[in-house]
Image (spheres, grey):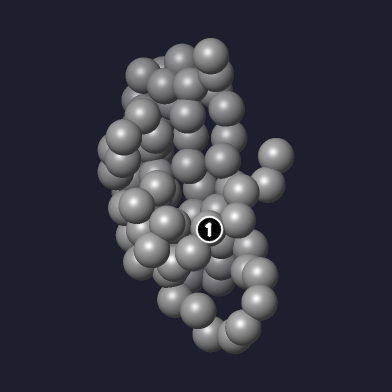
Amino acid sequence: MIDVLTPEGFSAQYGQALSMSERGLQGAAVVIGVADLGVTEGCLAANGVDYRKTGARLVVAPAKGQGVTFAFEELK
């Protein structure tokens, strides 16, 4: 599934600003479905990965050279 969001919509969904350096579509986030969000949170914390809870997601901001936000949400 692909969602197309405005910078404002991206900020609302992922809790961070989206910088637009060019016109047109830009890949900005990868959403990964996980079986247990608590287990995923523990794994991120144990490995020193900075993340924040935004709604029902765990959001990892882009690391230098990474380019995109990673978001984890529990499968329904």
Image height check: is 13 above or below 43?
below
Left or right side of 15 for 27: right
Question: Badge 1 is on which residue?
Answer: 5
Residue 16 coordinates in the image, percent (x, y): 34, 60
The x, y position of residue 62, in whole percent, is: 46, 61
Residue 68: tell me if it is visible: no
On the image, which quarter does residue 28 sit in?
bottom right
Q: Position of residue 61 (x, y in %)?
A: 41, 56
Identify the residue at image location x=36%, y=58%: 11
Give the residue displayed 38% in from the left and 37% down from the top: 58
The answer to whether residue 54 is visible is yes
Say which residue appears at 61% left-offset and 49% top-offset.
3
- The amino acid on which the numbered mark 1 sits, given as a three-letter code, is Leu
Q: Is residue 66 above or below residue 69?
A: below
Residue placed most toward the observer, 19 or 48? 19
Left or right of residue 46, residue 71 in this image: right
Of the 4 image quadrants, the one containing the N terminus is top right
Where residue 34 sits, quadrant-wise, is top right
Query: Which of the two residues, 67 or 19, is positioned nearer the viewer here?
Result: 19
Q: Secondary structure at mark 1?
A: loop
Q: Residue at x 63, y 63 (%)?
A: 27
Q: Is residue 62 left or right of residue 29?
A: left
